[in-house]
Amino acid sequence: MKQFIMMLLLVIQGTMLFAQQEKREIHKGNQLYNEQKYAEAEASYQKSLEKSKQSVAGNFNLGDAFYKQKKFDKAAEQFNALVSSSKDAGVKAQAYHNLGNTLMENKKYEESIEAYKKSLMNNPKDDQTRYNLAYAMEKLKQQQQQNKNNKNKDNKDQKNKDQKDKNKDQKDKDDKNKDNKDQKDKDKKDQDKKDQDKKNQDQKDQQNGQKPQPDKLSKEDAKRMLEALNNEEKNTQDKLKNKKATGAKGRITKDW
């Protein structure tokens, strides 16, 4: 019996010692927190939790130290653990309130609204939470409007890009057509130049005594030329006849 009492006293003394060490670390952490030495305060709160992992003050203040250092993910994890483990409505209300603030900093407005609502369910008289809820709802509205504007802008930019691409395609097509037309004009100009050069060369050759190629006779010219030849042939035959009739007499011999 005496041994049991001694052991019980030792346990009580040990528990009291751990509790004193826990409170001392929390007190030290609070002083550092007030001095805005949030990293050092975090270390003290961590030490207090080594003495008592279920310490509400140690867990709550550690979440605040994370928040002040902008370690919002760690802060949210800390406050979520508190609302899950605590049965006290006051503690849950404060933890949900701080969780809402943490989510607000990460611009998770819908989630922060839910956290503030749960905080008010545990403490309906908290005007500060009610104000933060209204603020979060307004920020959500602005965010949704901004997202809508960004979407409209993206759609407009896409339409402008599509129109720009279409205009570029049309310009490329027009440029190609223009190049084809320019090439045809150049080919025609080159051919005209060749024709003119040939004409100039023919004129030059004619001036230098070279006969140009005869042109094709018309039917009327050919008929006149043929009549002239016939007349000339007839005159020639008539002359031959006259010459035979008036020629000198010759001696006739017989072939006996």
Image (tube, grey):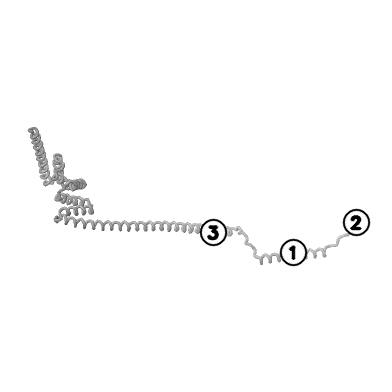
Question: Mark 2: which secondary structure?
Answer: loop
The residue carrying pointer 2 sits among few (fewer than 14), some (14 to 19) or many (20 or more) residues within 10 Å by Cα, namely few
In this image, 202 relative to 95: left or right? right
In the picture as drawn, the residue positioned furthest to the right comes out as: 256
Q: Earlier in the sequence, mark 1 or mark 2?
A: 1
* Label 1 environment density (alpha carbons within 10 Å; few <14, some 14–19, many ≥20): few
- Residue on which disc 2 sits: 255
Quarter of the N terminus within the rendering? top left
Amino acid on which the number 2 mark rests in the picture: Asp
Q: Position of residue 215 (x, y in %)?
A: 62, 62
The image position of residue 223, as x and y in percent, is 69, 66
Disc number lying in front (3 or 2): 3
For marks 1 and 2, give the CA distance. Answer: 37 Å
Residue 69 appears in the figure: no
Query: How far apart are labels 3 and 2 at the CA level?
Result: 77 Å
- The residue to which callout 1 is attached is 233
Would residue 122 be visible to someone looking at this image? Answer: yes
Towards the viewer: 131 or 225: 131
Find numbered disc 1 in the image and state the secondary structure of the residue it sits on.
helix
Disc 3 residue type? Asp
Q: Quadrant of residue 160?
A: bottom left
Q: Which residue occupies the foreground of this view, 253 or 85?
A: 85
Task: Name the image quarter holding residue 201.
Answer: bottom right
Q: Which amino acid type is shown beneath numbered disc 1?
A: Glu
Residue 39 horizontal side relative to residue 153, left or right: left
Q: Secondary structure at mark 3?
A: helix
Mark 3 or 1: in front is: 3
